[in-house]
Image: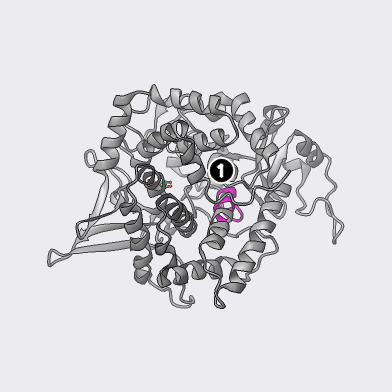
Amino acid sequence: MNEDAIASAYELLRGSVMTYGGEPVGTVAAIAEGSAEAENYHDCFVRDFIPSALVFLADGEGDIVRNFLRTVLRLRSQHQRIHGHEIEPAVLPASFRVGLDEQGQERMRADFGDHAIGRVAPVDAMMWWVILLNIYCRATGDKALALEPEVQRALRGILELTLREGFEVFPTLLVPDGSFMIDRRMGVYGHPLEIQSLFYGMLVSAVELLRDTPESHDIIALADKRANMLRNYIQLFYWLDLERLNEIHRYRTEEFGTGSVNMLNIYPESIPEWIVDWLPARAGFLVGNLGPGRMDFRFFALGNLLAVIFGITSQREAQGIMRLYQDRWEDLVGNMPAKLVYPAVVGKEWMFMTGSDPKNVPWSYHNGGNWPVLIWAFVAAAMKTGRGDLAQLALDVADHGLPQANFPEYYDGRAGNLIGRRAHLRQVWSAAGYILGHKIVEDDKLLDMFCAVDQRELAD
Ligand code: GLC
């Protein structure tokens, strides 16, 4: 390990700490360098804080994480209700910032998607909050926080919101476009994998954290059942390997009624050309999205890695995902771990899917860019499946470029050779993800702590 590189990552992380009333409450997304920074990068994003939080917990610094968890909860009161919408106190903000009001007093302002570019709904925030709370309790032994009445109420509220009867016919959660790390139009509306992985992680964490009282009893049972249904459904319908691709290739379509095999009526004609030669034998992955007549065959890294970390995939599937990384290393890791989505959408498909988004041109940003923050999730998934060799390889790749380039937000190009054209430097989660990756390789106990939601490792 390169001590100087880790030291520079820590310097960035420590410099990013945001305080309120003299207490640390979070970390900003990027540390400004010149005026080109997007305005909202001074915010603390819930999802961006996760790797920072895990580094702090690994270092025994639980205070900032506890303050963050409380702060996010308190900010719900700022949620502006939309006329005609039911009051929804379970929704948590995407991000928040601390500023000064006219009297020079500190004020916090949260964004619930009402300020965000494209006004996207941060569905992942409530999932991450519950998952982090569970990890915090295990890491610090401070169970009292989870038992506070306000926290118990919030947990119930989040379950009630996500388990509420809607228009659904699947155990997966239906969300609008851009409701998670990919917070732009990218064809990720409906049932994107990352949200499903987080949903599962949230459900099993909430079941563990909620006290079994007459008030919570039914919702706990419901959450438990849904988690099992969801896990089975993901294993059955999202999993793709050569065997399955062969089945889809010869699918019967237009089947009506209960006995149908091709339940979602996926047309074999929708299998994209690239996947046929790309998918290696004895490897596989969970597809990016699924709906009626729709299978998004793209590989979404974070959803797959979280599925391994949270124990959604079977042992065999988890091994298959790591083997895919091994066999398609140039495509999925290349010169900077790791590719967010593979492959990029191009041409007319890019126009229709992204709304001609110039930030998401092919092989850039969300559309096939490489994101260093993914290092921690990649390393955790690799270590969990006994692939320390791959974890080490990825860290070696990062060691040779990331600190020198000052922790960019993302990289461009098929193999991630170029620092992202519009990428921020000094992006905090790039540094935190890098520190965390190194820590997980060095200390087995951390892996147990971060895989805290994996309570139900079932036999294959
Ligand atoms: C971008 C990313 C989003 C992240 C934010 C701040 O919008 O897509 O996931 O939270 O930047 O880093």
Residues drawn in magenta: 189-199
| Relative depth, front residue between 316 and 236 | 316
Residue position for label 1? 309
Residue 86's x, y, as percent?
49, 77
Look at the image and say whether residue 191 sits in the magenta stretch. yes
**Residue at the farthest right position:** 259
Q: Is residue 243 above or below residue 61?
A: above
Residue 221's x, y, as percent?
63, 68
Q: Amino acid at mark 1?
A: Ile
> Going 67% across and 57% down the picture, which residue do you hit?
228
Q: Pick the quarter of the image with the C terminus.
A: top right
| Relative depth, front residue between 128 and 455 | 455
Left/right of residue 346 with respect to residue 361 in the rendered view? right
Residue 73's x, y, as percent?
38, 65
Left/right of residue 406 with respect to residue 381 in the rendered view? left
> Going 45% across and 66% down the picture, which residue do you hit?
91
